[in-house]
Image: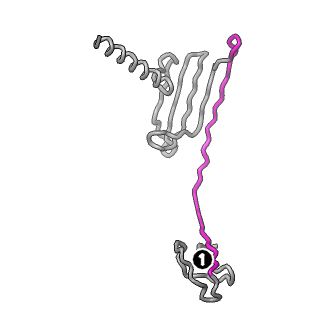
Amino acid sequence: MSPGVICEDCKETREESIISLNVSPCPNCGSKKIVVHVKIQEKVKPREKHKVKTMEKDGNRSKLAFEVVKGDDLHKKSGKWYNKERIIDKKNYRYKETVRDPETGKIIHHCEEPLNKHIGHGSAKVKILKEKCDRKQKASEGKST
């Protein structure tokens, strides 16, 4: 069905703008009742991300031993979708992350290092910045007294 305006009573196609709020009487039957047909199209691309975790018992609580995240990931700053693969292996003390542009296959980011060297990222970045602010504040308080 093509977009347009049709008289509800006689089903005659009307030559009216869809945007118009003033509906003139139908030239065929005189009715002011109309039916508006609008066609809306949208492209949808499904995205997926999988996360697998292995937990180990440590006394009364469980803690992360191994985690794999693989799939589509939205980069917040650029608003672009990338493919991300991240492995956190606490048993072998390793961190590995690779981010690729799905259109070109180009590696955007790659990091492979011991877990203790992987600091200042994600939620850890907030903690480091807070610690720096606290140190600066204490230093400035020490100078003013």
Which residue is at the front of the view, 110 or 20? Answer: 20
Q: Quadrant of the C terminus?
A: top left
Q: Position of residue 104 (x, y in %)?
A: 48, 44
Tell whether position 86 is magenta. no
Q: Nearer the viewer, residue 75 or 10?
A: 10
Relative to residue 11, is residue 113 depicted above or below?
above
Structural crowding at the residue carrying mark 1, measured as other residues with C-alpha within 10 Å and reported as few (<14), some (14–19) or many (≥20): some
Give me the residue at 52% from left, 29% from top. 97
* Left or right for 123, reference 29: left
Asked which colour scheme the image uses, the reply is: one colour
Q: Quadrant of residue 78?
A: top left
Residue 124 pos. (x, y %): 49, 23
Number of numbered discs on residues? 1
Q: Residue at x 53, y 22 (%)?
A: 95
Q: Which residues are magenta?
A: 32-61
- Check disc 1 and report the residue beneath it: 5
